[in-house]
Every structure is written in C-alpha cells, then in structure tokens.
Image: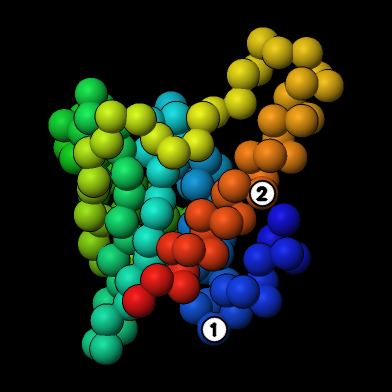
Amino acid sequence: MRALCRPILKQQGLHTADIFLSWEEIVGVSCAQVTLPTKFQRTATGDATLHVQVLRREATEIRYHTPKIIARIHQYFGFPCVQKLILHAVDSLPLSQPNTSAPQEEREEESDSSLEARLQRLQRAICDP
C-alpha cells in the first residue's frame, strides 16, 4: 500500500503518508478504533497540525490523551513531525473497522474495498488546500 501512495504523497514527505497508513500501529488498536486522521497541514514556519476525527462518545478521553498521542507520533518517526492535534468529534467514522469474526474470504473482500476507500480518503486529505 505504501508503494501505491508514495507518488501521491512524495511532495508532502514520507512521514505524512505513514501517519495515515500506520495509524493503528502508531496510536494502538484501541485508540485507532475510535479515531481517524483526516488531514495533515504544514505552516510556512514548518509547524505541522494533524486533524483527527474522533467518535463523539470518546472525544473527552482522547482529548485528555492528546499529548500522549503526539508523543507516540514523535516516537514512531524519531523526530517531532507534529506539533498540534486538532480533534473533530463525529458520530461515526467514515470507514468501518473490519469485522475480525467474519470468515477469511469476507475479510479479504472488506480489506480490498477498505483499501480503496482509505487511498481515496488519503488523497483527498493531502490534496485539499
């Protein structure tokens, strides 16, 4: 998946793509189930802001853990690539999480459609001004 996204995201920097593609690995499974990174913005001064959708019912908890999430992003990349996290409370996340109790064949079909949807969402997030 990274190979497909690299041309689209080359001008934004590899860490930008990895934030979206490795979100679950960066923040952990429990946090990734209730959050979704949607936009990465860099200012003229070089500071970066990451916009993250969070389920409304978990927004207070995630807001409390914002410094920890930023620290995990820095730890994952080995340098401070995000200075600010902006949380957007939503009733549901745009992509449903794969059902791990489904048979393998069904999970593969969901994975293929999920991959396409994630790539489209990622391209929109990066290309939006």
Q: Is residue 118 above or below residue 78?
A: above
Q: Residues within 10 Å of mark 1 (few under 14, many from 20)?
A: few
Say which residue appears at 50% left-offset and 36% top-offset.
Answer: 95
Q: Are marks 2 and 1 in contact (CB under 8 Å)?
A: no
Estimate the spatial distance between the alpha carbons at disc 2 and disc 1, rounded to whole Å. 21 Å
Q: For residue 116, which numbered disc appears in the image? A: 2
Label 1: which residue?
11
Say which residue appears at 33% left-offset and 65% top-offset.
Answer: 82
Question: Can you give x and y, in whole percent of width and height, for residue 112 in the image?
Answer: 74, 40
Indicate which disc, 2 or 1, sits on the residue closer to the N terminus.
1
Q: For this rendering, which residue is in front, 120 or 40?
A: 120
Question: Can you give x and y, in whole percent of width and height, for residue 28 in the image?
Answer: 47, 35
Q: Is residue 120 above or below residue 95?
A: below
Q: Is residue 67 above or below residue 45?
A: above
Question: Looking at the image, can residue 30 be seen?
Answer: yes
Q: Decide if residue 68 is on the left or right side of residue 106.
A: left
Give the residue type at disc 2: Glu
Quadrant placement of the N terminus: bottom right
Q: Decide if residue 112 is on the left or right side of residue 40.
A: right
Q: For this rendering, which residue is in front, 80 or 3?
A: 3
Quadrant placement of the C terminus: bottom left
Q: For residue 113, what is the image quadrant?
A: top right
Circle 1 SS class = helix
Give the residue type at disc 1: Gln
